[in-house]
Image (cartoon, grey):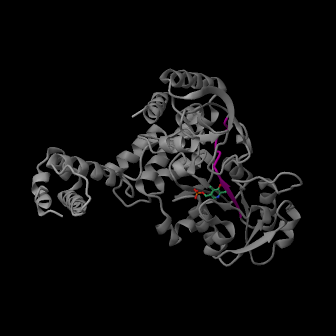
Amino acid sequence: MTNNNFRSLPAVHVILKIKAIHDLTLTLGQENVVSEIRLYLDELRNSLSKDNSPPLNTSPESIGLAVCNRLTLHFKPKLRKVINATGIVLHTNLGRSPMAEEAAKAAYLAASGYINLEVDIETGKRSSRQDSVREWICKLLKCQSATVVNNCAAATIIVLKSVAENKEVIISRGQLIEIGGSFRLPEIMKVSNAIMREVGSTNITRIKDYESAIGPNTGALIRVHTSNYKINGFTQSVTIEELIELGKKHNIPVIDDAGSGAVIPLNCKGFDEEPNPVTSISLGADLTLFSGDKLLGGPQAGIIAGKKEWVDKIESDPLMRAFRLDKMNLAALEQTLLLHLNSSTVSQKIPTLKMLSVSMDELHEKAIQLETKLKQIGLCDKVEAKISEGFAGGGTLPDQQMPTWVVDFSAPNLDTQSLSHKLRTAEPSLFTRIKEDKIVLDLRTLKTEEIDIVVHVILNSLKPI
Ligand SMILES: *Cc1c(COP(=O)(O)O)cnc(C)c1O
């Protein structure tokens, strides 16, 4: 309305002189800061032009503060640290497996400088990036050769294409699985140009079903681990052992998509029911494949191990260039594999294995610590440490409820959904479970040193402003 009001707005260059704003130009760049200031001034001008506009503080300091807050909010990184109190160890949406310190450090070194990714230091000649992990995988799985790609989905595609392009791949109807994020076996087969030959039924497949499907155009027999579901009741399936025997009899390659890659024996409920790639290899599978970031506890990767002739064929496929692992993941994977080679320390060194095998006593101790501290802040209702049931997650041990210790609580004057949202959007972000209208904090995925942070986040979210 009044031009006087407009004139009272400070100029952009005046606001740019405010220290906090000036500091932001150094990190975010002058351009971004200036355009945010302009936007804010436009909004102010708009408000002031309205007849009924309330009195606005148009001092440079006030405008500077508002612009600072906006810039900090707008340029907040989208990927942030999360505290995982869900108890789900392999939480795909939270990045699946956290890596061992050694692996994370190797990834950092690879990322921040140069490494001998594809050169032999001794000879100075070009080498394969696969050489950094091949030997370790072979040692661990006692296989002839191995290669790695971006993830197990990529591994499945390139293996099917290399072994059975334009040929039939015999698979049980009970194993035509979908793994989260549109990985569906029938579609993967199509992408690989393999011809899917389904046998058996959803709940029952016998070895003779496979045998009677074998013909002149059979390219492979495949076992796909039904990672994320279980059929209970009247069921029958063929063991990898039987399948390998059948493959040998008819001279047809056998592929084992083991998925989760439970390589070492672990003291954890149901772990021994996961397919073990070492066993598949020792029984004579041609190829076995599994993820790097499930039970191996490393970076995202798809590990392909088995007979050298197949691995060589896979590596010469043009898709390999598109699927190959990057230097950071390779460096992290190498360290993860090295940790696996020491069987007496691996379950303590790899966070995923440590969390899955932690004793109830240790969980109990942490739960009591958390319970005591939460009670001390005096802002939560019904704080209680108790035994509960959790899951491993990430398409592993799907029907294995694992006993765990949790602390649950609610808040006065705040419903559980809103509280959960408040904790999730806090700094750092805290992810929890909800059960029976209470917030559940599962100690399995919380490190001892995170307990104080959790208490701090809850305190900040509940304290009266
Ligand atoms: C998880 C899984 C995959 C996919 O692995 P990603 O590494 O997530 O791509 C494929 N097959 C099986 C059997 C799995 O369990």
State which quarter of the image contains the C terminus: top left
State which quarter of the image contains the N terminus: bottom left
Bounds of the magenta segment = 254-266
Q: Is residue 451 above or below residue 419?
A: above
At a point 26% along the width and 59% down the height, the residue shown is: 52
Query: Whole-percent x and y of residue 437?
Result: 64, 39
Q: Splitting the image into four quadrants, where does ligand 1 fall?
A: bottom right
At a point 73% along the width and 65% down the height, the residue shown is: 176
Which quadrant of the figure has residue 417? top right
Count of marks, rendered view: 0
Q: In the image, 344: left or right of 268?
A: left
At a point 37% along the width and 49% down the height, the residue shown is: 110
Q: Is residue 238 above or below residue 352?
A: below
Query: Whole-percent x and y of residue 383?
Result: 59, 27
The magenta stretch spans residue 312: no
Query: Whole-percent x and y of residue 67?
Result: 24, 52
Which quadrant of the figure has residue 445? top right
Q: In the image, 429: left or right of 240?
A: left
Residue 211 visible at all: yes
Which quadrant of the figure has residue 51? bottom left
